Image: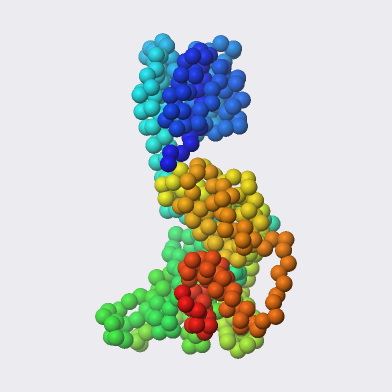
Amino acid sequence: MKKVWPILVVDDEEVMCESMAAWLREDGYRVDTAPDGHKALELAKSTDYAVCFIDLKMPGGMDGIETMMAIHVIRPESSIIIITAYATVDTAIQAMKEGAQEYIVKPCHPQEISMLVSRMLKLKKLQSENAILRKKISRQYRHRDIITKNSRMEEILTLTREISSIRSTVMINGESGTGKELVARAIHYSGDRGEKPFVSVSCAALTETLLESELFGHEKGSFTGADGQRKGKFELADGGTIFLDEIGDISPKLQADLLRVLQERRFYRVGGTQEVSVDARVIAATNKNLAEEVRQGRFRDDLYYRLNVIEIRIPPLRERREDIPLLAECFVERIASELGKDIAGISASALKLLIEYDWPGNVRELENVIERAIVTSHNGTLVEGDFSWLNQHSTAGQTWVVPDVPLAEMERRVIEAALERKRGNVREAAAALGIDRSTLYDKLKRYDIAH
């Protein structure tokens, strides 16, 4: 599907103006026309035109060059093509010097117009994709790239700036999908360790033995399959930051090992006899209440206090609904470009639906929903119908009456409903429920739920 690129044609000759507009509309573009520079400027204030065709000689006090310069002030990304009936080297040089990308000579031919616009828009798309790629490569996690206008999140960003260059451990608390790793990366990349490695480890994804090897490395022959020495994540993060996600899921043995690393900055590789020293800042994250885990005896209190030197609590998305439009528009721009889909934005009614939904899976769920809508959409704009299934699950402004059933039965029903909504996708269901995949797999086995 062709993106509905907006194009402006400015010419005081009505026949010329309408003919060119008609040719462009046949190619699928949205086209506006203006008889003079003043009307063109008025239109440009309300519409971000991708390409503007502007006649060089026009009455009314604004010629083509003046109109082009005025539009460039408010729409610097617009590509300008000057139309002239009097092509000379001087006019071409003047037009290009003042910012025109091209100039064409009357009478204009439809094929010439089509090829010129197609070439310009291909270039624009390439530039947009390159800008997104550069943003990814060059520290996309800096503070200015964390999108928010929520006061609590702004306080968090202020704190991350203040602590970015100190070595103290940080504990980030928040539901699954709230962006804990994003905040951790913002701390790392805005501090004096920003040029050093940032190494992320999911503590819930591996067994105790594998996680131990992943964190501390191993020596050759230390276990079956250990064909050589391998550095662990702590060594790889030397001088930088190691991010321990879902820290509440590590075993008692690894809790003791981690405590020693935090206290002494030294450890042994699995099967090793020589101590390894590291200087890695530790940022941990969890969606559990670790204070309660300590009270229940499932997490060491000394490790908890070592990790919890600086605490950051990220609010769930339902408590910062003002961020939903900003995040949604950002996801649409990025995902549509990555997937090669021509999606211009989100309609007001669709945005209202997104704002009213409670987002149990938080920002990650919003991103997944946007991606799904983009993949299945057949419009140039995401509309309410692209998110219609959210209507069935929106809880804003509703009171949920709990039925008289045992708690275990209620949990089983909620899990089954989540799996049904996510069409059996365990990863998405876990995100929607606010738990990690390993926990959900345990519950599926406990309740004998097919998936």
Which residue is more in the foreground, 14 or 98? Answer: 14
* 408 left or right of 270 in image: right
Q: Nearer the viewer, residue 296 or 48?
A: 48
Q: Nearer the viewer, residue 378 or 270?
A: 378
Could you say where residue 168 lies in the image, as x and y percent from the top left? 57, 71
User: Residue at coordinates 55% horizontally, 69% vertically from top-left?
Assistant: 418
Q: Is residue 344 visible?
A: yes
| Image quadrant where one finds the N terminus | top left
Question: In the figure, is residue 28 to the left or right of 392?
Answer: left
Q: Measured along the vertical axis of the image, is residue 28 above or below residue 384?
A: above
Picture layout, residue 410 above or below residue 339: below
Residue drawn at x 55%, y 79% as measured from the top left:
248
The percent coordinates of residue 173 (x first, y second) are 60, 71
Residue occupying image coordinates x 28% and y 82%:
225
Residue 34, picture quadrant? top right
Percent x, y for residue 420? 52, 68
Q: Is residue 136 above or below residue 413?
A: above
Q: Is residue 154 visible?
A: no
The residue at the far left in this view is: 227
Foreground residue among 114 and 42: 114
